[in-house]
C-alpha cells in the first residue's frame, strides 16, 4: 500500500509537470508578442527608409535637370500657316525638329496654291492677298516665278474681279516623285449676269526641293511649309 501511494504521487507529479510544460505562460507569451511587434516595426521602418532614399534620389535628379535646363535658351520658332482667305491659323510644328513635312501637308499647300492662283473675288484686297501668297510660294529666279508673273500681268485678278467671280470647288494632289506632283481641280466661274459654268483642269508641279518647315520670320507666316515651286505646267 505504501508503494502504491508513492507511485501514485510520482505519477501525479509527472502529470502536473507535463501539464505545466504545455500550459500557456503569460510571461513567455508576452515576450513572444513583443518580439513579433518589434520585428514588424523594424521591417516597416526599413521599407520606409528605402522609399525615402529613392524619393530623395529622384528629387535630386529632378533638381539637377531643372538646373541644367535653366541655363539653356528655350526660345523656339513655331511654324504655322495663316490662311487669310479663310481666316484660320494652322499649327505646323517646331522649326528645326524633324521638319520634313508629311505628304498630306505638302498636298494641302499645293491645293492652296492652286486656289491662290485661280480664285477671283469682287473684293480687290482678297485678290491682292491671293496673288501675293501665290508668288511667295514660287522659288526665286525659277521658271515658276517668271511664268506666274506673266500670268498675273495678263490676267490681273483685281480687274477680272469686276466682271467675274471664280472659285476652286475641289482639288486633288497626287505625288509623282519626292518633288513632283500632279494637280487636278474643278472651278466654278460666275459672270456679271449670274451665269455659272464649271470646268476641270489638271497640271504638274515640280518643287525646288523636298519641303522643310520654314522658320523664316518674314516668309514663315505666308509659306510655313517651305513649299517652293520651281516649275509648273497647268492645262487651263
Image (tube, rainbow, N blue to C red):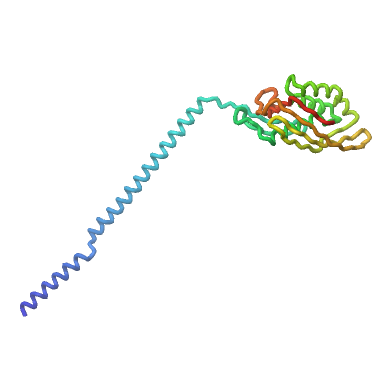
Q: Residue reaching furthest top?
A: 141
Give the residue displayed 63% in from the left and 29% down from the top.
78
- In this picture, is 155 found above or below 22? above
Q: Position of residue 161 (x, y in %)?
A: 87, 29
* Left or right: 192 as drawn, with respect to 213: right
* Left or right: 161 as drawn, with respect to 175: right
Give the residue displayed 89% in from the left and 28% down from the top.
162
Viewer-closest of 78 and 98: 98
Q: Position of residue 55 (x, y in %)?
A: 42, 39
Q: Residue reaching furthest front?
A: 177
Q: Residue reaching furthest bottom?
A: 1
Give the residue displayed 25% in from the left and 59% down from the top.
29
Give the residue displayed 19% in from the left and 68% down from the top.
19
Q: Residue reaching furthest right?
A: 193
Q: Position of residue 33 (x, y in %)?
A: 28, 56
Disc tally is: 0
* Left or right: 27 as drawn, with respect to 49: left
- In this picture, is 6 found above or below 177? below
Q: Quadrant of the C terminus?
A: top right
Asked where in the image residue 168 lies, by quadrant, the reply is: top right
Q: Position of residue 82 (x, y in %)?
A: 72, 30
Q: Quadrant of the N terminus?
A: bottom left
Amino acid at each position: 500500500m505504501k508503494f502504491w501511494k508513492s507511485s501514485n504521487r510520482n505519477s501525479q507529479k509527472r502529470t502536473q509537470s507535463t501539464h505545466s510544460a504545455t500550459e500557456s505562460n503569460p510571461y513567455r507569451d508576452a515576450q513572444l508578442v513583443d518580439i513579433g511587434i518589434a520585428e514588424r516595426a523594424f521591417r516597416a521602418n526599413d521599407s520606409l527608409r528605402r522609399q525615402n532614399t529613392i524619393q530623395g534620389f529622384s528629387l535630386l535628379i529632378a533638381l539637377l535637370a531643372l538646373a541644367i535646363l535653366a541655363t539653356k535658351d528655350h526660345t523656339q520658332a513655331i511654324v504655322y500657316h495663316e490662311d487669310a482667305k479663310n481666316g484660320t491659323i494652322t499649327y505646323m510644328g517646331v522649326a528645326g525638329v524633324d521638319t520634313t513635312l508629311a505628304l498630306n501637308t505638302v498636298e494641302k499647300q499645293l491645293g492652296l496654291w492652286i486656289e491662290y492662283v485661280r480664285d477671283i473675288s469682287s473684293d480687290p484686297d482678297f485678290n491682292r492677298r491671293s496673288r501675293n501668297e501665290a508668288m511667295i510660294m514660287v522659288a526665286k529666279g525659277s521658271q515658276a516665278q517668271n511664268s506666274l508673273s506673266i500670268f498675273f500681268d495678263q490676267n490681273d485678278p483685281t480687274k477680272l474681279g469686276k466682271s467675274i467671280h471664280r472659285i476652286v470647288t475641289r482639288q486633288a494632289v497626287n505625288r509623282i516623285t519626292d518633288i513632283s506632283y500632279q494637280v487636278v481641280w474643278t472651278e466654278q466661274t460666275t459672270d456679271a449676269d449670274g451665269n455659272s459654268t464649271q470646268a476641270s483642269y489638271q497640271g504638274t508641279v515640280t518643287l525646288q526641293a523636298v519641303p522643310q518647315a520654314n522658320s523664316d520670320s518674314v516668309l514663315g507666316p505666308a509659306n510655313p511649309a517651305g513649299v517652293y515651286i520651281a516649275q509648273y505646267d497647268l492645262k487651263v
